[in-house]
Image (cartoon, rainbow, N blue to C red):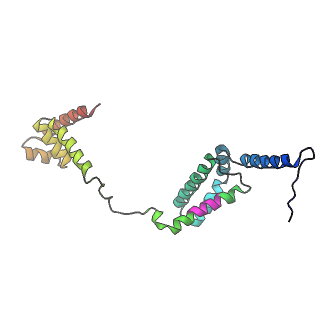
Amino acid sequence: MEITRIATPTTSPETSETTTEHAASTTAADDRMTTAEFDEAFTAVMPRLRRRLVALTGNPHDADDLLQETYLKLSRRARAHTLTRQQQPYAYTCAAALNLLRDLWRHPSRRERCTDRLPERGWDGGFAGREAEAVTAALLRGLSPKEAAAVILVDIEGLTHDMAGERLGAHRGTVQRNRMRGHAKIRAALAP
């Protein structure tokens, strides 16, 4: 099979090869989308794509998440200038979204899971808790004994002013005043 090349009559065969290669590279560079062009094209197909994703996932929240992931995936390509202009932008974005959806179905571990359990403690072995206790103890040392007692009983142990007053053998109003003075001193100590 013989390959024929189209050359202009004024050029030699050597220059026609260079010209066609240059034209091919220029065309490839011109076919790249800028980020502004990508944003405009994606915005145009987004409502239609979202309706399609809602129909596929059955949940508008999952469809919105998938739409956002599709946008992020394709916008990275546009910023890297590797995304070419598409004849059918809806079909292209729909194919990218479906690929992401298939990945979620194939790898269920990538999906978010709802749970009623609290997160486990950090890997630091309780260092953050110990550090918080040390800071709290240092702040309480800056208070008078009555102020510290009021802050500990009401704010840390969760007692009411009346219950704290019974424990301390003081009136409710006295406990409240001591607590407010303690809070003012703690705020002053924490202020930069």
- Kindly report the secondary structure that dominates the magenta region of the rendered protein: helix
Q: Please provide the residue range marked out in magenta.
A: 93-100
Query: Whole-percent x and y of residue 104?
Result: 52, 65
How many numbered marks are there?
0
Residue 151, image x, y percentages: 17, 42
The quarter of the picture where the N terminus appears is: bottom right
Residue 160 magenta-highlighted? no
Query: Residue visible at 30% across and 55% down?
Result: 123
Q: Is residue 94 visible?
A: yes
Closer to the camera, 180 or 24?
A: 24
Residue 100 falls left or right of residue 151: right
Identify the residue at horizontal 63%, vertical 54% (top origin). 46
- Nearest the viewer among 129 and 190 is 129
> Where is 189 relative to 94, above or below?
above
Name the residue furthest left. 169
Instruction: Give the image location of residue 68, x and y in percent.
Output: 56, 54
Say if 140 sits above or below 49 in the image. above
Q: Residue at x 88, y 53 (%)?
A: 6
Residue 184 quadrant: top left
Vertical comparison of 16 with 184: above or below: below
